[in-house]
Amino acid sequence: MDQVRIGKFIAELRKRDGLTQEALGEKIGVTNKTVSRWENGNYMPDIEMFQILGEVFDVSINELLSGRYLDGEDLKKEADKNMVEISKESIFSCKEKLSFWKKKWVKDHAVLIILLSVLYIAFCIYSYIIKLTTMIIVLPLAALIIYAYMHNKMSAYAEYKTFVRK
């Protein structure tokens, strides 16, 4: 979708109806600066705002998304094209969702991760000071087990949030 073309079309419709940016903003519940950003092509209205703009200007959402008046066959072609474009821009891939939920889990559990890391370092230093050679062998194994457990919990959380949660 061409933001600049959409913005110019919104400006054209606004001027056609004799509205200022401020008047349009008041009518649809946004600031005049927001309207200006749309018209300059710096930002796009969200889909709910396209619906409101369509009602205000008596044009279809597809006309707004296309940035021009449409009729007949053009309307159908542009509707299909716009639907594909919107779905590309608004839907996260599974990989992106998994990444988001993993990062969220790590952020939510940061204190626990830091605490376990500090305890591990403290045990390593303590073992070195009192020369417990068995602990030097056991501690990396314990760290590996804890890491595997925490990674499994994070992965299960991310997969649940991505694929199961409605």
Image (tube, rainbow, N blue to C red):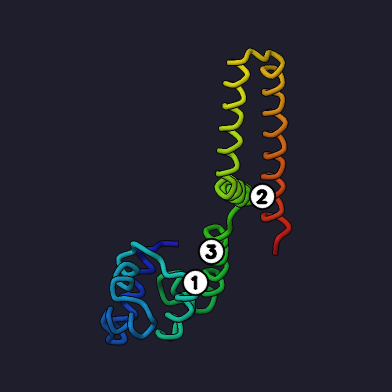
Q: Position of residue 144 (x, y in %)?
A: 69, 28
Q: Position of residue 64 (x, y in %)?
A: 44, 74
**Along the viewing direction, whichever of 158 and 61 lies nearer the viewer:** 158
**Category of crowding for the residue at label 3, using alpha-carbon neighbours closer than 10 angstroms: few (below 14), some (14–19), many (at least 20):** few
- Quote the CA–CA distance across marks 1 and 3: 9 Å
Q: Residue at x 62, y 25 (%)?
A: 123
**Along the viewing direction, whichever of 145 and 119 lies nearer the viewer:** 119
Q: Secondary structure at mark 3?
A: helix
Indicate which disc residue 73 carries.
none
CB of mark 1 within 8 Å of CB of mark 3?
yes
Indicate which disc residue 47 carries.
1
Indicate which disc residue 158 carries.
2
- Which amino acid does the dot numbered 2 rest on? Ala
Q: Secondary structure at mark 1?
A: helix
Give the number of callouts: 3
In the rendered image, the quadrant that contains the N terminus is bottom left
Mark 2 / mark 3, whichever is N-terminal: 3
Q: Position of residue 69 (x, y in %)?
A: 42, 77
**Would you place residue 155 above or below residue 92 in this image?**
above
In the rendered image, the quadrant that contains the C terminus is bottom right
Mark 1 / mark 3, whichever is N-terminal: 1
Eye-nearest disc, 2 or 3: 2
**Category of crowding for the residue at label 1, using alpha-carbon neighbours closer than 10 angstroms: few (below 14), some (14–19), many (at least 20):** few
- Quote the CA–CA distance across marks 2 and 1: 28 Å
- Quote the CA–CA distance across marks 2 and 3: 25 Å
Indicate which disc residue 86 carries.
3
- Which amino acid does the dot numbered 3 rest on? Ile
